[in-house]
Image (cartoon, grey):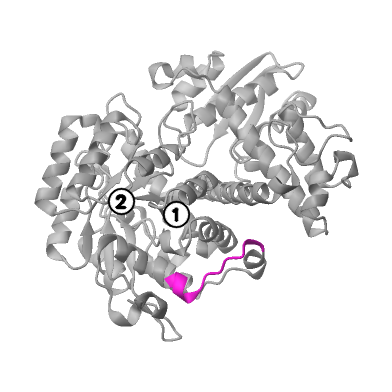
Amino acid sequence: MEATHDGGLEAAVRAALGTVVDPELDRSLVELGFARAEVLDAGRVRIELRLPTYWCAPNFAYLMAADAREAVSAVPGVREVEFRLLDHFAGEEVSRGIEDGRSFDESFGELADGGGLEELRRLFRVKAFTMRQERLLRALAARGATVEALAAARLGEVPECEELRRYLLHRRRLGLSVEPEAPLAVMPNGRPITPAELGGYLRRARSARVAMDFNASLCQGLFEARYGGLADGHG
Amino acid sequence: MYRAPDGTSYYVVDGHVHFWDGSPANQRNVYGKGFIECFYAYHRNLSPPEWVWPEDKFQKYDEATLIRDLFEEGYVDRAIFLPTYLKDFFVHGFNTTEQDAVLKARYPDRFILNGSFDPRDGDGALEYLEHLVATYHIQGVKLYTAEWRGSSRGWKLTDPEAKRCLARCQELGVRNIHVHKGPTIWPLNRDAFDVADVDDAATSFPELNFIVEHCGLPRLEDFCWIATQEPNVYAGLAVAIPFIYRRPRYFAEVLSELLFWVGEDRILFASDYAIWSPKWIIERFVDFQLPEDIRQETGVDLTPEAKKKILGLNAARLYGLEVPEERRPASATA
């Protein structure tokens, strides 16, 4: 990437882009190598999105693109954002739609079902929450916590750890309480999970976590096969 | 048949093979090019290096290559053709029933020929289905719900036209419905990998078997849940099983979920040839063990008997294939 006049802006833009996640993989777009941003000249930024396949679902691409544009646009000093979805069957429609600030439905007309992307976003926030919860509870169980203890536990009783930090982030995203006295094990709607339910709940959550890990591995492998690794052009 | 180093024999049915033409001459447009390039990325990403083909060979391979890779070197006793038409992307279609039928005629004991239909053809879909049954005596179909057709970007098993076709399948004895649920190509707001329509169809048509190709990945958890409710839903291992080479841990995780929820009687081996070749997969699969921690956590195991069922006996049951006596597991003879 070329040196720019404003290293501070460059860093702020990258940091902003770094907060945007792939909703399906629950990982940062920058970390995955999918997105990059470049400060072209004073206040003008170009975002490029590259995905694992030519066929990656355009609704997911649209969500990520809109999030990326929003995050970068909010950086003080950014005046204008160019956006490109590269090497994708719907690249033109998505790029133009995002640059013009149109919704997915507006960009895809009758091909979209008119329901907007919020339901999809909510679905994947719930999935990500479920998996982060499973990882945390599984880690606590591995350290000796029983199902009964987990079902009775409050957030404040959980020792600081990476799994807890991630879990709290996803609780916040769903608008759930992160207060120390809030129950640890809750459904995505906030209802506490009973001791009788927890075993079965975790068993299903395991499948969801396995699917997400598998999918992340597949996507990253396809991305590497397509673009030759993360480092290339995504410094 | 595969004879393992320990002397055990395995009857092998490859549940998902293709004889395609993705060559530039057959590509109708940029989508055809994008389609075969995507397949090629799957091929390169998950195959052992010595099994990676040059791109032009991958776009279009010949009969001798296919016969050698499946039957002469690949241990496959029977291979199930699953057509994928994609006529909006490829001039003569990507891989039609008619193309597969040429090989079926030459090697009648080696291939199981399946058909397909597109419910968006309306009455034409029923007529085509009847034609395939009369001409080729098909026992199954491959349905590709994400296929583009004109301005349509796909369909669902729950569409009234689709249900009409499935009802006719049931009447005609076309019992095995292979449904592609995997990498997909339609711009709709909803989650396009959703397997909920399989749930509905499996309930509505209890005499039909629904083999979900790619076992619902990346929506494995939804697929597993459906399969626990519906006894006529099966998991096809295409795309999952080649992980055995580069990402064996992930393969073990996925397989353990399938064994736990779906069970060893409803999982089918599939190479998805020519994306992957059966030889290296079969050798590694027979040698494969679930890691101890996964066995402990899930309570399932991949026994030699389970391997026999997955590699061939389950598909043999669905298609009424005669399995040589010595390859039946001892407990299954009762």
Q: Is residue B147 left or right of residue A74?
A: left
Q: Is residue B266 magenta?
A: no
Percent of width and height locating residue A219: 54, 46
Image quarter for residue B121?
A: top left
Left or right of B13: which side holds B168?
left
Position in image of residue A225 (x %, y %): 50, 50
Residue type marked 1? Val
Q: Nearer the viewer, residue B3 or B137?
A: B137
Residue B22 shows up from this direction: no
Of label 2 and label 1, which has the lower sequence position?
Answer: 2
Please report, as a chain letter, where disc 1 is located.
B
Of B31 and A211, the residue lying toward us: A211
Indicate yes or no whether the magenta region holds residue B302.
yes
Tell me where the magenta segment starts and ends, as one range.
B297-307
Around disc 1, counting alpha carbons within 10 Å, would you say few (fewer than 14), some (14 to 19), or many (20 or more)? Answer: many
Q: Could you tell me the amino acid type at mark 2?
A: Gln
User: Considering the numbered disc 1 on the image, is that residue within a helix, a strand or a loop?
Assistant: loop
Residues under labels 2 and 1: Cα distance? 18 Å
> Which residue is drawn at the image coordinates 41% and 16% (left, top)?
A109
Q: Which residue is mark 1?
A: B239
Quadrant housing residue A81? top right
Looking at the image, the residue that sits furthest to the bottom is: B7
Q: Which residue is mark 2?
A: B59
